[in-house]
Image: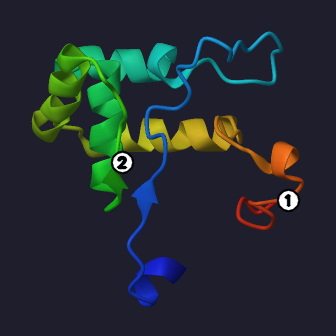
Amino acid sequence: MHHRRHGIHVTAYSPLGNSNPTYSPDSTDLPPPLLQNKEILAIAEKANCTAAQVALAWGRSRGTSVIPKSSHVSRIEENYGAKTCILWSDDTKRIEALGEKYLHRFNNPSKGWGVDLFEGLDGV
C-alpha cells in the first residue's frame, strides 16, 4: 500500500460508520448503518463481541488507528473492549466484502465543501 511504503500511518475517521440519527438509508443503494449490518452482527455474535467492537477490531487488524467518539461511559468502555475482540480470517474477509458490495462513505463533506475529496481513491 502506498501509505505504508512512504511511512504514513492512517487513522480511521469515524470507524463506526455514521450512527447519526439524520442518516437514514431510504434507498436500496445505501448500505444499512454499519452497527446494524447483518454481517457485522453475525460476526459479533460468533465472536461474543458487540458490533462496535467488531468494527474497531477490524480497523485495528488493518494496521490503522481507530478513534471512536463517545461521551457515554458505557460506550467508551465498550469501545475499549475491542482490544479483546478476536476476529478470524474468514471474519475479516466477510467484512472486507462489505466494502466491495457497498462503495459508500458515511462521512463525506465533499458536496458541502465543493471539493471532490476522494477522487480516484475508490478505483471509480
Q: Is residue 52 left or right of residue 30?
A: left
x and y percentages locating residue 119 in the rendered image: 81, 64
Which comes sooner in the sequence, label 1 or label 2? 2
Please state which of residues 18 and 29 is positioned toward the viewer in this rendering.
18
**124 versus 103 height, above or below:** below
Q: Is residue 68 left or right of residue 29?
A: left
x and y percentages locating residue 68 in the rendered image: 36, 37
Question: Which quadrant holds residue 47?
Answer: top left
x and y percentages locating residue 41 in the rendered image: 38, 16
Residue at the image point whose x is 42% and y is 44% from the top: 93
Q: Mark 1 and mark 2: span between their CA atoms?
A: 26 Å
| Number of numbered tags placed on the structure image | 2
Residue at the image point whose x is 13% and y is 40% from the top: 83
Please state which of residues 56 and 109 is positioned toward the viewer in this rendering.
109
Circle 1: residue type: Val
Residue at image mark 1: 115
Q: Sort mark 2 into few (<14), some (14-19) or many (20+) by Cα contacts within 10 Å.
A: some
Find residue 59 and name its label.
2
x and y percentages locating residue 102 in the rendered image: 68, 35
Residue 90 visible, this orientation? no
